[in-house]
Image (cartoon, helix red, strand yellow):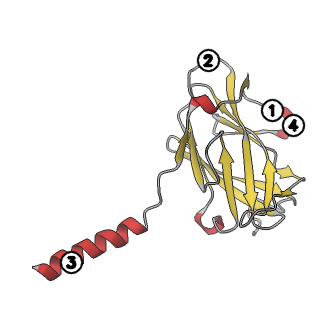
Amino acid sequence: MKLASLLVAFMSTVAAAHVAPAPRTVPCSEIIDNTRFPYRGSGYRLVLGAVSVPPAYLRQVVPTGQRPWAYWRKAGLVVRAGSPPVTVTVPKEWRHRAAITWGNSTGIVAGLRLTGCEPARNVGHAYAGGFYLRLPSACLPLIFRVGRRTATVRFGLGRRCLSPAAAP
C-alpha cells in the first residue's frame, strides 16, 4: 500500500511539473489609452475581430543590454472594448528564443490574457508592450485565442517573414 501511495504522489508531482502556468491576466487599469476600433494605424492587422496587432514587419529592434533577452521591439496592442478575453501565447518551441509583454506590470512572459473591459461601441483599449528576443531578428509566430477561436500570426522582427510557413 505504501508503494502505491508513493507512486501516486510521484506521478502527481511529475504531472504538475508539466502543466503550463495560467497566463497572467492584464487588468483594465493597465490600459494606456482608448482609440477607435478596429485600430488600423501604421499597418496594424485585425485578428479574430477582437484585437488589432502590430504590422507583419517591424524593422527596428534595439539591444537591451540585458541577458537573456538581449533585444526588444516596442509595439502596442489594441483590444476591442467588451470583447471576450484575448489570450496571446508564444508557442512552446519558441519560448527559449522569444517572449512578450503587454500591460504595465506584466513582466517578460510566454503568455498573457487581456480582457475587453467595459463595453463601448467602436472603442479599443490600447496596451503598451512588445517583443523580447535573444537574437537580433526573428519571424515570430504568436497564438491568439478569443473564446474557442485561435489564429497564429507572424511578426517579422528585424527581418521580414518569407511566408506564412517561414522557419525560425
Residue flagged by tag 1: what amino acid is it? Arg
Residue bearing mark 4:
42
Secondary structure at badge 3 equals helix
Residue flagged by tag 2: what amino acid is it? Ala
> First in sequence: mark 4 or mark 3?
3
Residue bearing mark 1:
40
Q: CA distance from mark 4 to mark 3?
A: 58 Å
- Foreground mark, 3 or 1, reads 3
Q: CA distance from mark 3 to mark 2?
A: 54 Å
Residue sitting nearer the eye, 100 or 41: 100
> First in sequence: mark 2 or mark 1?
1
- Foreground mark, 3 or 2, reads 3
Residue flagged by tag 3: what amino acid is it? Leu
Q: Residues within 10 Å of mark 2 (few under 14, many from 20)?
A: few
Q: Which mark is residue 120?
A: 2
> First in sequence: mark 2 or mark 4?
4
Residue bearing mark 3:
6
- Foreground mark, 4 or 3, reads 3
